[in-house]
Image (cartoon, coloured by chain):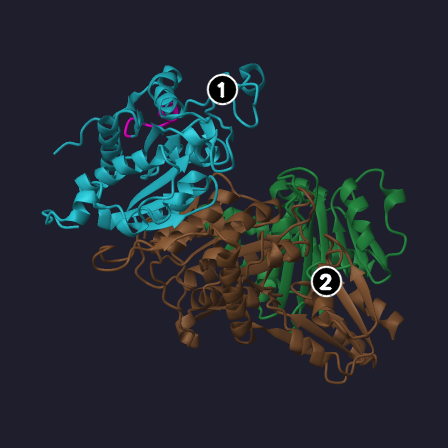
Chain colours: A green, B cyan, C brown
Amino acid sequence: MANEVKIALAGEGGQGVQSVAEIITEAANEEGKEALYIPNFGVEQRGGVSIAFVQIAEKQKIGSPKFEKADIVIALSDRAVLRSRQYVDERTVFVYDKSIQGVEDDLPKNAKQVLAIPAIEVAKNELHPRVFNIVIMGAVLHATRVVSEEQAKQALENKLGYKFEQNPELREMNHKALARGMELVAGLAQG
Amino acid sequence: MSECMEVTATTLLEPKMPRSWRRASKPHKFCPGCGHGDVLKALGTAIDDLGIQDRVVFGCDIGCSLLAWDFFECDTVQAHHGRTTPVITGIKRARPDRICIAYMGDGGGYAIGAQHLVNAATRNERITVILANNTNYAMTGGQMAPTTLPGQKTETCPYGRDIEAMGNPTLGPEMVAAITKENAYVARGTMANMRQLTTMLKKALQNQIDGRGFSFVEALASCPTNWRMNAKSTWDFVEKEMPNYFKVGELKVPAPKEG
Amino acid sequence: MTDQTINQQKPVQGEKRMFMTGNEVIAYAALAAGAEMMCGYPITPQNEIMHYWTRLAPKYERRFLQTEDELSAGFSTLGGVLAGRRAFTATAGPGNVLMQEPLSMAEMMRIPIVLIVQQRGGPSTATVIYSQQEVTLTCYGGNGEGARIVYSPSNHQELYDYTLKAFNTAWTYRFPTFILGDGYQAKMRESLTIYDPAVRGVQMVPTEPIIGGPGAPGTEREAVHLRNTFNTEEELYEIITAMMGEYDRIAPSIVEHEAIQTDDAEILILSHGVVSRATAAAVRELREAGIKVGSFRPITLRPFPVEALRNALKPVKKMLIVESAQGQLAKLCKEAIYGETTPIEYIFKPGVGVTAEEVVAKVKAMA
């Protein structure tokens, strides 16, 4: 990873961007890195676009909790594209879900790279819609290398271990989702 | 003061006062004819009879009740207007072995501190709230209070309280009785019946001593200064006028504690 | 262990690296400090302080009361303190306005209450998110002129350290003591080390009943009669003068600040709290670019580090004040440096966060 990585994750409430941010930063912290995560929050408990601001550094303490421009922006709905493009500049990789309709004109023009990944489709057709956010997590990890896959799995274990105990297939599905997410970005990077 | 005191000229001149009263702050600071002295005498007698002086923490409010800040030979805190109930609640929650009393007027209890009275009662706080009802804001110069009677003149309703515009006087004990559980003690007494008032205050404090629940006593009290009345009219107002609206009696009495 | 089992062990043992939100940090710090009682009323963004406290407190025989409003939360906390408990409350925004009433009583009666403020946007309900707009209110919010101590931490480690310290400051000097945090600090997660104060040699100042203590009043001891109402101008004057005199005497042992590369700084950036994270990062970047810049941060906003700031100003040609408010820190600062002629520029962003990037851009324009 770069010395310091800034990530903005934006999605609809319920898409799980906040838990992705939480798991990634906890994993980074476990690896001894400095991590900071802050959710945006307003008066609405539910509904509206949800954004997670994540910063991870090798050693140095993180500066201000929010930032102007991100190294990677992930947008998971049409509204999320509109809300999150303000965090994009010429160094930003902008990732959005391929299934989002009618946002072609709204995509940032100034990004270093704009990637469309079929995360929703993969989760729905190959795995289960509930692991959609883990596919996204895999994509973020591959794009940023902020934590290792092993550490990410450990963090998943810490967060969902009690569920995995009851249903070991769930563990397998989560691991698969993580791997598929990583592949989605890897495939594009090669192409 | 010892139980059997030698009779001297001084003691003969001294009026009988409860042992829990602080002699150094007497004569007290209330106006001549004020009902607070009587209510606090009933309270002092109740404290004496129950033998709890050492355990009492007394809180007084703003309004004329603040003049009781050094009234008792008991630990005392004078709080802000309406806020005696939460201060006393905090003390009781921190030290449940203390007997905690919040003393206030009708403005403090039914207006600015109404939310505290309602919620302390709802939570069944193990405290005793004593409220002197003299139908006006006395310390600030006799304005209309929640308890000002229909037609009664005050500085802010100089033509008399218009219940169309200002509503009916607050019936505090009735309200508290309606929102408390069976283990609360709620009563309205009057300075015109000191024996009954003392009994009510003893029962209220006993309810706290037993750890059963909230206890609340409103005491009808005089304010000749702001009522602008002579002694006779003052007494008539307390004894005859006020009870027409504010019914004297017990509204909620828990069953006696077993054993 | 069931949820209600009383744990005889200390809630925080030894030292432990954690990754948590600021609200969680405060709950743990209060537990570790031996706080015995919290009274609170829900308001965003401080709610999770109560949430963590209510989960943890019963396991360690600590008390909690959810009240009907902030007035009641503040006054019942005062009751707890008067009864000798290490007690605290937490609030934000409009709740902080209501909290000023009990806090002014604490000032007058010298009640060592600790209040956590997580600033949100204002005026009015505004946002539940973040601001530094409660500086004036928190430092000077009471009626009349009371004395209080206000710490403004900038990261989770400090949030922990200064919450511990706030209880000791309050109980040592008997002035109400504030931790002025903000919504960002409340909600963000970062690493810190939590610790049992004893392992770091920090002794918690013992508490004692101010009212309702042992002994029979009137016979074994004097009865305690506490009041905040006085009859004459002279009585009040005497009390305020004595209080302010005492505050001035103890201020040098309370006042704290952080200065970064101020020795040769030609441009001095002044900020406090979470904004200092941005200014510190900006100083690093600007120094790499060869610009002689330093950063000064009052950790105590009251008492304000007047002498330290005046010293830091000596080599300075220009000053920049940065805050997420429309000039509340600037007001404190200008009063502290009265008579100095250093030109001052500002980044005022009421209710909005400040990033290192914009501080860097501004300083480059000034240099």
Magenta span of residues: B176-183
Residue denoted by label 1: B152
Helix, strand, or loop for circle 1?
loop
Identify the amino acid type marked 1. Answer: Gln
Rate crowding at label 1 as few (under 14), some (14 to 19) or many (20 or more) other CA atoms within 10 Å.
some
Q: Quadrant of the N terminus of chain A?
A: bottom right
Q: CA distance from mark 1 to mark 2?
A: 51 Å
Please give the label number shown on residue B207. Answer: none
In the rendering, at what x and y percent does residue C246 appear? Answer: 50, 70
Q: Nearer the viewer, residue B2 or C207?
A: B2
In the rendering, at what x and y percent does residue A5 appear? Answer: 72, 65
In the rendering, at what x and y percent does residue C168 appear? Answer: 45, 67
As for residue B179 lying within the magenta part, the answer is yes
To the question of a shared chain for discs 1 and 2, the answer is: no
Identify the amino acid type marked 2. Answer: Lys
Q: Nearer the viewer, residue A120 or A9?
A: A9
Name the residue located 41 percent from the left edge and 43 percent from the top edge: B66
Residue denoted by label 2: C331
Name the residue located 29 percent from the left edge and 25 percent from the top edge: B192
Q: Measured along the vertical axis of the image, is residue B212 above or below residue C212?
A: above
Q: Quadrant of residue C316?
A: bottom right
| Residue at the extreme front | B9
Q: Quadrant of residue C207?
A: bottom left
- Of all chains, the one bearing label 1 is B
- Can see residue A63? no
Q: Do the residues under discs 1 and 2 have CB atoms within 8 angstroms?
A: no
Q: Nearer the viewer, residue A170 or C339?
A: C339
Judged left or right of residue B48, residue C99 is right
In the rendering, at what x and y percent does residue B220 appear? Answer: 35, 26
As for residue A52 lying within the magenta part, the answer is no
